[in-house]
Amino acid sequence: MKWQGIISSRAEYIELAPEDINSLMNRGKLFYEMGDHPKALTDITRTIELNPDFIYAWQLRGDVYTAMGRSDEAEADFAKVKELMEQYESGRLAESGD
């Protein structure tokens, strides 16, 4: 499987840099696309813990919760996306996830 090689290389990098939010997000997104929602949730939640203003992480976690049938948690994450977008648009929040 093409995904396994990519995931393995991400896992190795995350071992070396466990707080690299971009690697965590990329691996979480791959897990999500593969349908491995629990693993996606773990990586994306860790990303949010490291950078709670990372709008895309909240959006993707809401998508994962939706795919898992956890609508209440998804709605809470989507509400957080809206809140952060409003802060960003008003200039109270710097762009996150760079």
Image (cartoon, helix red, strand yellow):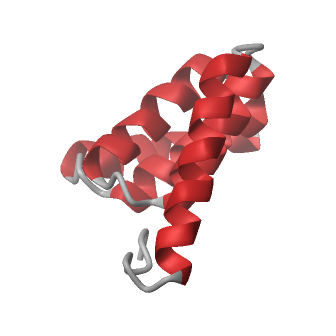
Residue 26 in the image, given as x and y percentages of width and height: 55, 53
Residue 31 sits in which quadrant? top right
Q: At which x and y percent is residue 68?
A: 73, 16
Q: Residue at x 42, y 71 (%)?
A: 96
- Residue depicted at 44% across the width and 79% down the height: 95
Residue 27 appears in the figure: yes
Query: From the viewer's perspective, is 11 left or right of 7?
Result: left
Along the line of sight, which residue is nearer the eye, 32 or 1? 32
Q: From where the camera sits, is residue 31 visible? A: no
Query: How many marks can you see?
Result: 0
Q: Quadrant of the N terminus?
A: top right
Q: Residue furthest top?
A: 69
Q: Which of 73 and 42 lies nearest the eye of the viewer? A: 73
Quadrant location of the C terminus in the rendered image: bottom left
Instruction: Give x and y (percent) for residue 12.
Output: 34, 45
Which residue occupies 53% across, 47% down?
80
